[in-house]
Image (cartoon, helix red, strand yellow):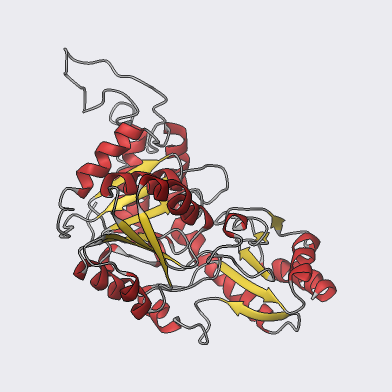
């Protein structure tokens, strides 16, 4: 597919030509571990063993690379498997990483509990403050700047283009976790990012029925010592082996076909939920990049197509009220994860971000996070209103 094709055209067709044998218009599930060789070392169409490559996974990797405007895609068994592979491929003991001060709890846990004991140091920075990012850089030691935008769960916004400049000036690669925005709403590589990561479990899959991750690289990484980053990631993907299986790849590929239409509905519904929350007396603050009062609203408006389907808010009566409100809803599902067609509600401090309690990344106890689904929004608001009227 050409970059000139629209997003949904690429989502439906990139890497997904009709099956050469049968003409099937949907990529088959190649549920196979090994492949017959045409003579010793004669790999048919490049396939030898499904850890190294599988046709269903190849279709997903080509599709997501096309959607992100990158050179090459890599599909993993989870988002964290992809992040781990990027870190192992590009960092060595003694290197330093700058990570967000409100990063996803699993990402912070990885850098703090897995990478740090292996000699990879990190510092925390407010990615919405460019001077704070500059101050966190250690000249000669910082090799990677890790950005989430919007962040999980405080919906912070980072200026990708500006931070790319800061990272590259320091000789570091910029990695952007694009899970919340998705490739439909935001294009980090076009803004200067070197690597994009996703938990494809979320919006990419979109139906809460698959766990997966993806990494996409840009073709022209010019950071010194990183020119072969793409090949190093490919080598580590195969060597570590945390790859997406064929059925998981097929489910994610199916989800990507409708990503654009789903994201439009997620955004439509989120905007109406935000409007409701802004007017409720029990809510002390609404966190959403689309609000003019958001600290980096102008940046979000410049680099995002729309503002996404994630909404967080704080309860005026504190943590107890937040916990009770989460339990009182009936249509919203109390659960972790996000990005599915159904609406989810959670208490980050006791659920997704419990692992960062007591650290610099601890989230407020009165915070509630919503993953706004694609149901009829009047029903979603009525359910929220009932819970907040009682406990707000």
Q: Position of residue 143 (x, y in %)?
A: 26, 58
Q: Nearer the viewer, residue 259 or 87?
A: 87
Q: Residue furthest right?
A: 390
Figure disc tally: 0
x and y, in percent, of residue 240 in the image: 35, 34
Residue 15 left/right relative to 299: left
Say above or below: 206 vs 293. above
Residue 43: % across, % down: 20, 22
Return the residue found at the far bottom: 293
Say which of 275 and 212 sits in front.
212
Which x, y percent locates residue 183?
Answer: 38, 60
Closer to us: 139 or 74: 139
Question: From where the camera sits, is residue 18 visible?
Answer: no
Judge whether residue 370 can be spotted in this image.
yes
Left or right: where 317 falls relative to 44:
right
Q: Is residue 139 left or right of residue 295?
A: left
């Amino acid at each position: 597919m050409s970059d000139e094709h629209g997003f949904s055209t690429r989502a439906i067709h990139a890497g997904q030509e009709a099956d050469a044998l049968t003409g099937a218009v949907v990529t088959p599930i190649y549920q196979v571990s090994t492949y017959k060789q045409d003579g010793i070392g004669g790999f048919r169409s490049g396939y030898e063993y499904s850890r190294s490559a599988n046709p269903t996974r190849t279709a997903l990797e080509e599709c997501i690379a096309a959607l992100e405007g990158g050179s090459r895609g890599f599909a993993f068994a989870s988002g964290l498997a992809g992040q781990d592979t990027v870190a192992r491929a590009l960092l060595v003991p003694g290197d330093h990483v700058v990570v967000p001060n409100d990063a996803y709890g699993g990402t912070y846990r990885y850098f703090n509990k897995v990478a740090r004991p292996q000699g990879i140091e990190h510092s925390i920075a407010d990615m919405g403050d460019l001077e704070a990012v500059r101050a966190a850089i250690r000249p000669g030691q910082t090799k990677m700047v890790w950005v989430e935008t919007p962040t999980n769960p405080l919906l912070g916004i980072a200026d990708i283009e500006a931070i790319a400049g800061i990272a590259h000036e320091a000789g570091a690669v910029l990695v952007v976790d694009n899970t919340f925005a998705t490739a439909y709403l935001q294009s980090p590589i076009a803004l200067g990012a070197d690597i994009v990561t996703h938990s494809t479990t979320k919006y990419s899959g979109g139906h809460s029925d698959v766990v997966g991750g993806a990494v996409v690289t840009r073709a022209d990484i010019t950071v010194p010592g990183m020119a072969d980053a793409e090949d190093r990631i490919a080598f580590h993907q195969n060597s570590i082996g945390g790859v997406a299986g064929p059925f998981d790849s097929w489910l994610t590929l199916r989800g990507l076909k409708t990503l654009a239409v789903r994201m439009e509905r997620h955004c439509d519904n989120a905007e109406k939920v935000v409007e409701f929350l802004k007017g409720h007396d029990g809510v002390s603050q609404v966190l959403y990049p689309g609000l003019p009062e958001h600290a980096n609203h102008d940046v979000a408006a410049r680099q995002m197509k729309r503002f996404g389907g994630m909404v967080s808010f704080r309860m005026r009566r504190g943590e107890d009220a937040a916990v009770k409100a989460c339990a009182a809803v009936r249509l919203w599902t109390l659960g972790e994860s996000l990005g599915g067609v159904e609406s989810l509600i959670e208490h980050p401090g006791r659920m997704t971000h419990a692992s960062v309690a007591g650290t610099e990344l601890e989230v407020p106890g009165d915070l509630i996070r919503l993953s706004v689904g694609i149901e009829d929004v009047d029903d979603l608001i009525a359910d929220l209103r009932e819970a907040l009227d009682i406990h707000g």
